[in-house]
């Protein structure tokens, strides 16, 4: 384990625990996940990219100390530094690592404008549930000789690239929000959609999912996520 080069002091233990939960979910999809960390103004923003979803996930945490830094680090090492079982509000900042290409292509900090037309949280979760069921049904209907990763990727792309209502937000962004614990099953749960340039951002009280339009340079990953 890398020895932390700097300590993190969160505003309270709940902030540390919520961040740990987010990191755990990222590591579920990629045990070698890296995260981009930006701190300033008493807040820490953590960016991650779970494989398959083709989105950026953003979780923020309030800090007690007004420190400033911008590094890429190991998600696993950051999680190991958070002692949430004892209710500790401190953690360690791991040594920087060379991150994957996506860490250099982050959403803008300013210029976001709210977009209308986003369905309510219950409808969003219902849409994801229906999409997962469709994926499984179409996957099971494949003949044995076509039950390949390539065929499943085609099904996944067809389903998860569909947009939500008339917003232009791909359904995979909603699925990512639900899978990472950002989208809760409550009718009065506040969600909003924002746009800035080619970026769209689904915001909830527990985190945001950002996605860039086609040809954005984020790369193409498989989207066989229907059965998860």
Image (tube, rainbow, N blue to C red):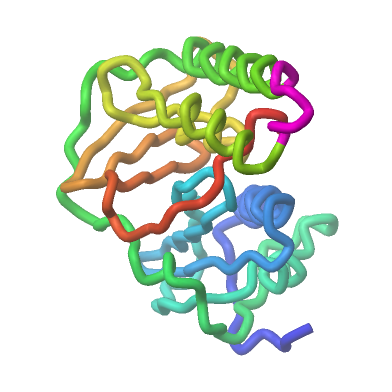
- Most foreground residue, 114 or 27: 27
* Residue 177 percent location from the top left of the image: 53, 35
Q: Tell me: 159 left or right of 88.
A: left
Q: At 41% from the left edge and 77% from the top edge, which residue is drawn? A: 70
The magenta stretch spans which residues?
A: 140-147
Is residue 56 shown above or below 106?
A: above
- Most foreground residue, 221 or 21: 221
* Residue 119 percent location from the top left of the image: 38, 14
Extreme-right residue of the structure: 85
Image quadrant in which the C terminus is located: top right
Image quadrant in which the N terminus is located: bottom right
Is residue 1 shown above or below 75?
A: below
Is residue 76 shown above or below 138?
A: below
The mark tally for this picture is: 0
* Residue 68 percent location from the top left of the image: 39, 77
Q: Does the magenta portion include 225? A: no
- Most foreground residue, 206 or 178: 178
Q: Tell me: 141 left or right of 45.
A: right
Q: At 55% from the left edge and 40% from the top edge, which residue is drawn? A: 223
Q: At 43% from the left edge and 71% from the top edge, which residue is drawn? A: 101
- Most foreground residue, 96 or 6: 96
Q: At 64% from the left edge and 29% from the top edge, which residue is drawn? A: 226
Q: Tell me: 108 left or right of 152.
A: left
- For residue 164, which quarter of the picture? top left
Extreme-front residue of the structure: 145
Is residue 159 shown above or below 150?
A: above
């Amino acid at each position: 384990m890398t020895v932390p080069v700097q300590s993190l002091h969160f505003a309270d233990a709940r902030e540390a625990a919520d961040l740990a939960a987010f990191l755990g979910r990222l590591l579920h999809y990629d045990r070698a996940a890296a995260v981009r960390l930006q701190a300033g103004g008493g807040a820490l923003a953590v960016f991650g990219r779970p494989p398959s979803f083709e989105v950026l996930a953003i979780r923020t945490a309030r800090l007690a100390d007004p420190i400033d830094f911008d590094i890429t680090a190991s998600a696993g090492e950051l999680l190991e530094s958070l002692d949430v079982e004892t209710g500790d509000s401190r953690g360690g900042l791991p040594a920087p690592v060379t991150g994957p290409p996506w860490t250099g292509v982050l959403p803008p900090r300013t210029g976001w404008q709210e977009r209308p037309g986003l369905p309510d949280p219950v409808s969003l979760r219902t849409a994801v549930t229906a999409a997962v069921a469709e994926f499984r049904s179409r996957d099971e209907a494949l003949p044995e000789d076509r039950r390949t990763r390539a065929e499943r990727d085609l099904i996944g792309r067809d389903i998860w690239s569909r947009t939500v209502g008339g917003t232009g937000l791909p359904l995979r962004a909603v699925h990512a929000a639900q899978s990472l614990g950002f989208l809760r099953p409550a009718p009065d749960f506040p969600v909003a959609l924002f746009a800035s340039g080619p970026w769209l951002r689904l915001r909830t009280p527990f985190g945001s999912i950002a996605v860039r339009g086609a040809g954005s340079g984020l790369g193409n990953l498989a989207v066989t996520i229907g059965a998860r």
